[in-house]
Image (tube, rainbow, N blue to C red):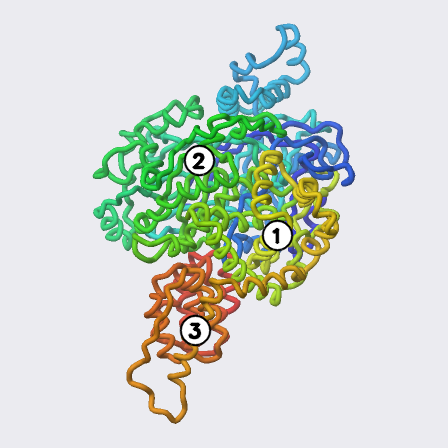
């Protein structure tokens, strides 16, 4: 085990310290309380452990497709997923790293008499930082009488097992119980997590350094002898990198997991390496007026917490996933419905300045209660009865299921279509868990139950998401098949959220920047940013979550795939023709090509490589620890290379085999690899086997590595193809409009001529949102545009009321040409679109205009308290 003192404080690699080759956490039981007054989460985590047998390392040559385990692991891992997915426009949501990179040292914390343990004692190493640990103790699960019914064999056999190690026997039997007993297993995990400490009353010895929590039991020399259930009592820190304490758009306090590069290790001690798959259950206590949203398979009904003003929310998952995918959001969210009472919006507007608490709807006494022990097993049909999550007392009471599907009838979509159901012979190759891919009903469920939440002031705008969501879900099902997760919540997160979206199991975070600023009756072409972003996040359910990267440095496996699929799913949701789909795809490809070209010109080569570990990808140390290359590099947070270069690699491969054939291959790949982690070679090798003509063309695995994955820069094919995209019909239409605007500008710039009092009448062609982005980008390349032309642009296209992608380019144009009349649009963008605004600060400062620099300083002062830490640090370096 590498001590913290040996880590270079200036390194940009993130250490994954957990010794997953020695022992694995199979289940977490969290019991947490949210304290908004102190900005901490306190409570305990009970870890149910399973030792690994036959320790040793595998050579990388022994690891083939479908094994689902990286070099250095000792047994096939049952369920494989990547880290929770972080998506952004200007940069990824690799936030929250400031407290780690800026702080060179952290207070070392140890339990009493840690020094009395020996190096010969076995050490459990967990990934952990920014936590105050108060106690670690062994849990006496033998006190749970119901556990005895799980033990196999007759009484004499059970007696023999118990005499050797009763705790280990109980836990191992519970962990290995079949998936058909998942409800009973959840209840037993819950009972065991509330068991008292070991009878001897002694705490386990622990030591916490910057990146890890280390636990020992004196005299225990092997993982097999180590306690199989332990409780860690702890408290988070207000500045911890895994959670964000902030205020929502209604000026109400809230907290959510930040999706930072350190994942969840500052939320609870855990095993962060991707191979450490586990299930979990969580009980979260929060003030009664707040809502708790979390990764969980069924929607919970909160119950009262005794005489306190808190409510208890319980969630669980039965599909083993990494701890990094655990997602939590607690705030005064309201559910979006088809109709928003005006009194509700007006009431919150009146209260936001003074911070008066808003009511959640029905009071706690009116809510349906469930037994704490059995509540985890409630079915969806039971949960929706008497749901507390309604939009106000004056709203007609409806069950959750009613408004989950309220928008489907208008779209002509059925909730579940069994007409085309066939048994396609899906055979799951992962371990035993209740898998939706094997469920007959799930295979034809086009639209899973879904809800949308947000602050009251954005409920009306968020109705667009409620309208589009069923169409996007149905389209994703058409393209990719079975939805991996049984339900979906979408939350509009606070303005300081540093990306456009983040996908986790059962929940998606969306930035307010994706909400359309125009009228409610907008066409699909006006909703492109909102629709395509939702499709991107939905695509992560398949690529990034149910199929993930075995090595986190291969982000392109999730981000490149989701970027590629968002166009296909969104086109399906819009029901475009094949020609329309191809034309829209070519226009987006050209926009992404321009973005990638600019990024690669202004970034270091080491960050341009999609497989930075190259031939060492997937390898770990003997204990299972490793590092994530460049994860803490602040420049990486602003890069899109894994999105864009990965997207273009998939477009290249599709061009070689045919797009429809490529899409059909995706479905086959999902069927084979769902529930597993993969490396690039797993996808590419299966593709080469499915399409043998590729190798005859010289497209071998090594050739693809060399051209696309292991080298910086841009492959030759992409240069050649970009020339074709630049001549596409939709692009040519934009070029024709640009000429009109340039001529108009020139008509206002003639020297020695009297300026015409009346501007010439020009017929401008109506363009889509993507075309408008391209138009503005091309006009940004012009050195001069007259003020009258800029004003006419704004008026013609109503630029201040378009989507955030368009408004971003409009603000760039305003800054470049010092169009002071629209500085208010720049200020509005920097305040309300923080996920995309970092670049604009640089533009304001580089112009060396006192007025523009003052604008940058003023905007920073307005939002710095709510900004993402890494974004704030970068902006302050520009402005201050």
User: In the picture, which quadrant includes the N terminus?
Assistant: top right
Q: Which residue is mark 2?
A: 446
Rendered view: 139 above or below 4: above
Describe residue 24's horizontal placement relative to residue 853 as left or right. right
Quarter location, residue 177 = top right
Q: CA distance from mark 1 to mark 2?
A: 29 Å
User: Would you say residue 625 is visible in this rendering?
Assistant: no
Residue 815 disc label: 3
Q: Nearer the viewer, mark 1 or mark 2?
A: 1
Residue 513 place in picture, x, y as percent: 41, 56
In this orientation, which residue lies closer to the viewer: 299 or 600?
600
Secondary structure under tag 2 reads loop
Secondary structure under tag 3 reads helix
Describe residue 514's horizontal placement relative to residue 701 as left or right. left
Secondary structure under tag 1 reads helix
Quarter location, residue 608 = bottom right
Residue 541 place in picture, x, y as percent: 52, 40
Residue 655 disc label: 1
Dot 2 surroundings within 10 Å: few (below 14), some, or many (20 or more)?
Answer: many
Which numbered disc flags the more N-terminal residue, 3 or 1?
1
Tag 1 near tag 2, CB within 8 Å: no
Tag 2 near tag 3, CB within 8 Å: no
Describe residue 179's horizontal placement relative to residue 687 as left or right. left
Rendered view: 88 above or below 838: above
Residue 843 place in picture, x, y as percent: 48, 71
Which numbered disc flags the more N-terminal residue, 1 or 2?
2
Q: Nearer the viewer, mark 3 or mark 1?
A: 1
Residue 822 place in picture, x, y as percent: 35, 71
């Amino acid at each position: 085990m590498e001590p913290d003192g040996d880590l270079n404080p200036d390194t940009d690699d993130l250490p994954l310290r957990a010794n997953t080759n020695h022992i694995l956490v199979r289940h977490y039981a969290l019991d947490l309380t949210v304290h908004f007054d102190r900005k901490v989460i306190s409570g305990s985590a009970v870890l149910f452990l399973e030792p690994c047998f036959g320790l040793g390392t595998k050579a990388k040559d022994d690891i083939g497709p479908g094994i689902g385990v990286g070099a250095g692991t000792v047994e096939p891992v049952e369920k494989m997923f990547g880290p929770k997915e972080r998506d952004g426009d200007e940069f990824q949501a690799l936030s929250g790293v400031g407290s780690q990179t800026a702080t060179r040292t952290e207070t070392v914390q140890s339990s009493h008499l840690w020094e009395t343990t020996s190096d010969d004692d076995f050490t459990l190493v967990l990934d952990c930082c920014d936590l105050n640990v108060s106690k670690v103790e062994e849990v006496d699960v033998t006190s749970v009488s119901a556990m005895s019914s799980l033990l196999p064999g007759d009484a004499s056999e059970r007696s023999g097992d118990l005499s050797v190690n009763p705790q280990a026997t109980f836990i191992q039997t519970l962990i290995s119980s079949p998936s058909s007993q998942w409800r009973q297993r959840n209840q037993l995990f819950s009972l065991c997590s509330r068991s008292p400490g070991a009878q001897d009353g002694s705490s386990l010895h622990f030591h916490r350094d910057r990146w890890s929590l280390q636990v020992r039991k004196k005299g225990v020399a092997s993982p097999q002898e180590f306690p199989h259930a332990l409780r860690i009592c702890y408290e988070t820190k207000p500045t911890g990198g895994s959670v964000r304490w902030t205020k929502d758009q209604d000026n109400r306090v809230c907290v959510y997991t930040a999706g930072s590069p350190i994942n969840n290790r500052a939320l609870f001690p855990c095993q962060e390496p991707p191979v450490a798959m586990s299930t979990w259950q969580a009980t979260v206590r929060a003030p009664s007026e707040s809502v708790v949203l979390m990764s969980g398979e069924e929607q919970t009904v909160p119950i009262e917490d005794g005489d306190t003003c808190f409510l208890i929310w319980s969630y669980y998952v039965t599909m083993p996933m990494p701890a990094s995918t655990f997602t939590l959001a607690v705030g005064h969210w309201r559910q979006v419905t088809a109709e928003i009472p005006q009194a509700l919006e007006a009431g919150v507007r009146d209260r936001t300045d003074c911070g008066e608490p808003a009511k959640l709807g029905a009071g706690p006494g009116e809510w349906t209660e469930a037994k704490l022990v059995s509540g985890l097993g409630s079915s969806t049909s039971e949960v929706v009865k008497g749901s507390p999550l309604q939009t106000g007392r004056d709203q007609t009471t409806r069950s959750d299921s009613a408004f989950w599907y309220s928008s489907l009838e208008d779209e002509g979509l059925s909730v579940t279509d069994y007409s085309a159901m066939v048994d396609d012979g899906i055979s799951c190759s992962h371990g035993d868990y209740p898998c939706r891919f094997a469920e007959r009903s799930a295979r034809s469920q086009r639209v899973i139950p879904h809800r949308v939440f947000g602050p009251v002031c954005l409920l009306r705008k968020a109705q667009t998401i409620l309208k589009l969501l069923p169409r996007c879900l149905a389209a994703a099902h058409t393209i990719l098949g079975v939805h991996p997760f049984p339900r979906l919540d979408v939350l509009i997160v606070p303005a300081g959220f540093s990306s456009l979206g983040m996908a986790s199991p059962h929940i998606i975070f969306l930035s307010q920047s994706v909400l359309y600023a125009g009228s409610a009756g907008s066409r699909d072409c006006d909703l492109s940013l909102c629709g395509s972003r939702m499709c991107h996040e939905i695509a992560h359910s398949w690529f990034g979550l149910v199929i993930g990267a075995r090595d986190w440095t291969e982000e392109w496996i999730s981000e490149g795939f989701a970027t590629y699929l968002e166009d296909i799913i969104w086109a399906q949701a819009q029901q475009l023709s094949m020609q329309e789909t191809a034309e829209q795809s070519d226009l987006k490809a050209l926009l992404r090509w321009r973005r990638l070209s600019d990024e690669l010109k202004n970034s270091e080569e080491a960050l341009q490589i999609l497989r930075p570990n190259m031939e060492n990808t997937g390898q770990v140390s003997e204990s299972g620890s490793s590092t994530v290359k460049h994860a803490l590099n602040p420049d990486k947070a602003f890069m899109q290379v894994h999105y864009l270069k990965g997207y273009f690699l998939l477009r290249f491969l599709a061009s070689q085999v045919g797009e429809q054939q490529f899409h059909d291959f995706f479905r086959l790949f999902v069927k084979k690899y769902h529930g597993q982690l993969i490396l690039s070679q797993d996808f590419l090798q299966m593709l080469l086997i499915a399409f043998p003509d590729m190798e005859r063309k010289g497209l071998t695995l090594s050739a693809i590595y060399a051209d696309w994955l292991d080298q910086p820069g841009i492959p030759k094919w992409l240069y050649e193809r970009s020339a074709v995209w630049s001549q596409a019909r939709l692009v040519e239409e934009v070029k024709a409009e640009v000429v009109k605007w340039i001529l108009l500008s020139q008509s206002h710039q003639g020297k020695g001529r009297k300026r015409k009092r009346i501007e010439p009448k020009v017929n401008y062609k109506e363009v889509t949102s993507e075309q408008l982005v391209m138009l503005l980008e091309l006009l940004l390349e012009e050195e001069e545009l007259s003020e009258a032309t800029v004003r006419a642009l704004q008026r013609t296209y109503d630029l201040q009321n378009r989507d955030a992608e368009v408004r971003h380019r409009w603000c760039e144009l305003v800054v470049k040409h010092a169009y002071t009349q629209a500085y208010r649009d720049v200020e509005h963008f920097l305040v309300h679109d923080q996920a995309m605004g970092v670049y604009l600060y640089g533009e304001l400062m580089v112009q060396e205009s006192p007025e523009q620099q003052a604008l940058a300083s003023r905007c920073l002062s307005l939002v710095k308290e709510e900004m993402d830490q890494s974004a704030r640090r970068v902006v302050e370096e520009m402005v201050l």
